[in-house]
Image: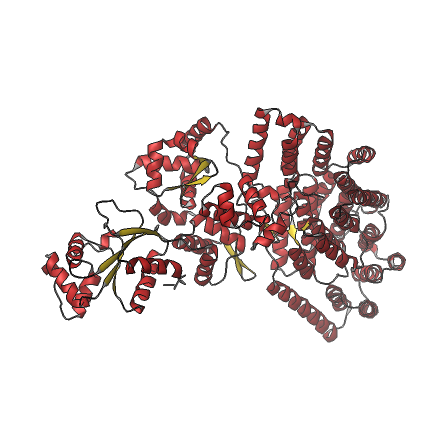
């Protein structure tokens, strides 16, 4: 049996000792699964260390007149007495007095069943001549007639998040990642046995997976294997009324006390609270009802039949006047884990091993094939340009095939173009690569890529990339992949998706990864946000599994563009981690590296000086802007200008970037930069140009963004309400919350209480749909959109410097409720200190939602 680390509770031990020293009995209230038995052993040790007599009467499931632990203590004193022989309380009291010699005695009793009537009578008799205190561990208060007149009630606190994390670390062998630990803590209500079961079953079933030394929740943590344990917290089977009421409250979720009374009745609700099946917490002038522990509510929700659900749902709708429907989280599918030092070390080791193997093969069996492999290894490890060119020159002396000659020419051109910034020389190298026969298409695709990255797309790029049907499959796949990229760059997303579907199935692993990145970008532009997230997550995880650094950089770019579109903030510290994970600038491809850095700065939430530092670090990287969205340095410059208060300059820089991207053939990037300019400062003339550009681009994401900006500029409530569902579908969560905030400030909405109530309700429902989503884009800091109204209030008060106790007084809440709010908002913001909370909400704490660019 595994040994579970015990977390001591020294403060509670001292509280109990003081009561015992004052002559009180203690009724220790602790829900099952809270480690109460282990606590009694801790208290036993403490009492004995102070020279006092103490005896623990454990719960061993016996049905005997006397606990076996007490009989064993009597036997140890040479007074063995058969259990059946002790029938007199006076005789038992005499035995106990002789054992302990009249010293004060403390009985630690694990549950009322360990305190049978005979022992209770003996205790009453013994107290006539000796001092004796009882500490009774129970999960509910005893009745007044059963309680000692000299008894006090003490609540055994549950473990804190950090304490529970330490226990799970010891039991599971590795720590749980922060957001996953918070989910386990929330479901178990801090009850250690439940948390252990959730974690261990999650690991066994693969719901918690080990990544970079931490267990991360990759799926929902509920499992039917938890049923036997969780049922123990439900009412007994014969209490059908309790079960039905609890199921109704579980399906309803977080409910006000007024609604809960309407659903199950006041008497039933009071009974459930008395039995500790529900928790009722005050919040201002209202009280909120939840099933406890929360995983019990999950059990009811998962176990309900469709017929039962329909009936309960109808009842809930009739009482709460809100449409009941199962809402899926807007971001539950996103979970890309942190890239830790261990993975970076493995990547470096793999690159080193790959180079060593290629070098050894080239040395042992010189030839064109081993030489090409050596060249590719040199490029992947960032070797000096001259070293790569010498290897290419050596390879050409071994009579390479047409395909090998094509690739050697391509790598030579890329070294000149990307490492030496000599595009004319690179194009000349490709022009001289003739006589390649069926493999000429490889050079054509490489030439188009050079133009797209470093100059401008040729007007006939699509025609050049039409592969011949008789070309080798590898050539067709390479040309189609580049054609997908061109279609995406031009904004022809439908054509891009059709080409993705038509790429030959025999593509290489590297080409497959490139296609998955492009598929994610196309899906994002089309407004298929969930598909984009799914492809990105799966591709990034595969790249990690295969230790493919090049593909990881490409998916980093896709991830950070997703973050920008979502309107999600990231911390400056996280951006520095990202820069470290990206490593040195690669020889090829470079745009993914630049895009990840630029989008990271756009999403970063920090002070002006911190953002300026990130921009300065980016300026030190000598890479030209590209024609893909988020690969322009102007985005980072505009972010800094806007934060510095110069919104006009930010808008101008974004517009200049849009015009330049348009000139280079990057129509999609141009439209997105144009929208960024309008978001900084709306200009009617520029808006007309962007509207015209969008007619050439089949992007629902950009169309929804433009409709939102136009509605905001026009101040049209109807237009804003119409565009919100489009923003939701396309994953633009930040703009959804900004839209609701704008509506809340509208004079028209404020003058219509019914409309204002509807908007407030929709905003709250949307915010709740983001709750507990497990969103963890590179451990990104969640945006304001995920905080409830109460959590916003608490965050503002934290930013104002108030302590939890002061917040309690300000909002008229219990201290436990405040602590829960603080814990939840820190979990959502992925921070661990109050100062980090202040920094994370800096963009909206003054009352305005931050820029989403």
Q: Which of 637 and 582 is in front in this view?
A: 637
Q: Residue at x 17, y 70 (%)?
A: 77
Residue 819 at x, y percent in the picture: 48, 49
Q: Which of 263 and 204 is in front in this view?
A: 263
Residue 589: in sight, yes or no? no
Residue 427 at x, y percent in the picture: 88, 56
Residue 691 at x, y percent in the picture: 79, 33
Residue 193: in sight, yes or no? yes
Residue 110 at x, y percent in the picture: 27, 56
How is the protein colored in the picture? secondary structure
Query: Hey, which residue is sitting farthest bottom in the picture?
Result: 364
Query: Hey, which residue is sitting farthest front in the picture?
Result: 22
Q: Quadrant of residue 647?
A: top right
Residue 374 appears left or right of 323: right
Q: Residue at x 63, y 34 (%)?
A: 740
Q: Residue at x 51, y 47 (%)?
A: 806
Q: Which of the image's four quarters has the N terminus?
A: bottom left
Residue 362 appears left or right of 6: right
Q: In this view, does 551 lie above or below 769?
A: below
Task: Give the tally of numbered discs.
Answer: 0
Q: Which of the image's four quarters has the C terminus?
A: top right
Q: Nearer the viewer, residue 224 or 26?
A: 26
Residue 379 appears left or right of 61: right
Q: Is residue 104 above or below residue 499?
A: below
Q: In which quarter of the image is residue 420?
A: bottom right
């Amino acid at each position: 049996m595994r040994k579970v680390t015990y977390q001591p509770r020294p403060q509670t031990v001292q509280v109990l000792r003081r009561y015992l020293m004052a002559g009180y009995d203690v009724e220790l209230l602790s829900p099952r699964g809270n480690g109460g038995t282990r606590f009694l052993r801790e208290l036993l040790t403490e009492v004995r260390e102070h020279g006092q007599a103490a005896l623990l009467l454990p719960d061993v499931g016996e049905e005997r007149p006397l606990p076996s632990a007490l009989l064993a203590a009597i036997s140890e004193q040479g007074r063995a007495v058969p259990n059946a022989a002790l029938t007199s309380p006076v005789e038992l009291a005499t035995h106990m007095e002789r054992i302990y010699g009249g010293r004060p005695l403390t009985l630690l009793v694990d549950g009322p069943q360990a305190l049978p009537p005979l022992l209770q009578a003996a205790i009453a008799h013994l107290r006539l001549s000796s001092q004796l205190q009882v500490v009774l561990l129970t999960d509910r208060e005893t009745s007044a007639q059963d309680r000692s007149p000299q008894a006090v009630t003490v609540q055994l606190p549950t473990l804190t998040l950090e304490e529970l994390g330490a226990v799970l670390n010891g039991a599971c062998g590795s720590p749980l990642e922060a957001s996953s630990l918070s989910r386990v803590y929330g479901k178990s209500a801090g009850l250690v046995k439940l948390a252990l079961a959730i974690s261990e079953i999650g690991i066994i079933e693969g719901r918690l997976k080990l990544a970079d030394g931490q267990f991360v929740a990759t799926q929902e943590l509920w499992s039917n294997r938890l049923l036997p344990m969780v049922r123990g917290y439900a009412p007994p089977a014969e209490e059908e009324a309790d079960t039905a009421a609890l199921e109704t409250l579980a399906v309803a979720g977080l409910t006000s006390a007024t609604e809960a009374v309407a659903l199950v009745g006041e008497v039933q609700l009071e009974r459930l609270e008395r039995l500790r099946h529900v928790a009722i917490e005050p919040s201002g002038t209202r009280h909120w009802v939840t099933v406890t522990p929360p995983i019990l509510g999950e059990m009811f929700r998962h176990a309900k039949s469709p017929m039962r659900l329909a009936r309960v749902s109808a009842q809930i709708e009739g009482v709460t006047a809100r449409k009941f429907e199962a809402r899926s989280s807007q971001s539950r599918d996103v979970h890309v884990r942190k890239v830790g030092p261990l993975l970076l070390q493995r990547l470096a080791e793999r690159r080193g091993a790959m180079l060593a193997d290629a070098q050894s093969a080239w040395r042992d069996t010189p030839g064109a094939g081993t030489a090409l492999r050596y060249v590719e290894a040199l490029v992947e490890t960032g070797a000096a340009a001259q070293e790569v060119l010498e290897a290419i020159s050596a390879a050409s002396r071994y009579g390479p095939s047409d395909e090998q000659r094509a690739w050697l020419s391509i790598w030579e051109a890329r070294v000149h173009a990307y490492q030496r910034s000599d595009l004319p020389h690179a194009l000349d190298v490709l022009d001289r690569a003739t006589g390649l026969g069926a493999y000429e298409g490889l050079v054509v695709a490489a030439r188009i890529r050079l133009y797209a990255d470093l100059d401008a797309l040729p007007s006939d790029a699509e025609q050049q990339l039409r592969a011949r049907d008789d070309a080798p499959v590898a050539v067709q796949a390479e040309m189609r992949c580049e054609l997908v990229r061109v279609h995406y760059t031009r904004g022809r997303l439908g054509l891009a998706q059709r080409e993705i579907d038509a790429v030959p199935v025999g593509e290489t692993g590297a080409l497959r990864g490139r296609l998955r990145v492009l598929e994610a970008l196309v899906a994002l532009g089309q407004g298929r946000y969930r598909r984009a997230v799914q492809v990105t997550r799966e591709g990034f995880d595969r790249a990690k599994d295969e230790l493919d650094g090049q593909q990881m950089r490409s998916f980093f770019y896709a991830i950070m563009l997703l973050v920008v579109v979502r309107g999600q903030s990231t911390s400056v510290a996280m951006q520095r981690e990202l820069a470290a994970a990206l490593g040195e600038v690669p020889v090829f491809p470079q745009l993914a590296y630049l895009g990840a850095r630029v989008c990271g700065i756009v999403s970063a939430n920090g002070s002006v000086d911190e953002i300026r530092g990130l921009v300065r670090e980016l300026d030190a990287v000598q890479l030209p802007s590209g024609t893909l969205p988020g690969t322009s340095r102007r985005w980072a410059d505009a972010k800094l200008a806007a934060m510095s208060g110069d919104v006009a300059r930010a808008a101008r820089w974004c517009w200049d970037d849009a015009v330049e991207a348009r000139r280079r053939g990057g129509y999609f990037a141009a439209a997105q930069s144009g929208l960024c300019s309008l978001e900084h400062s709306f200009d009617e003339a520029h808006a007309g140009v962007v509207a015209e550009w969008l007619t050439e681009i089949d992007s629902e994401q950009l169309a929804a963004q433009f409709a939102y900006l136009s509605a905001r500029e026009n101040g049209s409530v109807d237009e804003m309400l119409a565009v919100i569902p489009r923003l939701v579908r396309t994953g633009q969560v930040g703009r959804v919350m900004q839209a609701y905030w704008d509506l809340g400030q509208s004079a028209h909405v404020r003058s219509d209480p019914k409309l204002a109530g509807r908007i407030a309700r929709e905003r709250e429902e949307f915010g709740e749909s983001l709750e507990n989503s497990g969103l963890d884009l590179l451990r990104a800091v969640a945006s304001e959109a995920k905080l409830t109204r109460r959590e916003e209030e608490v965050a503002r008060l934290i930013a104002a410097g108030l302590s939890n106790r002061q917040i309690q007084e300000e909002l008229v809440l219990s201290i436990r409720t405040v602590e829960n709010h603080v814990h939840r908002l820190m979990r959502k913001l992925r921070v661990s200190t109050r100062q980090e909370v202040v920094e994370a909400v800096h963009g909206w704490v003054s009352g305005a939602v931050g820029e989403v660019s």
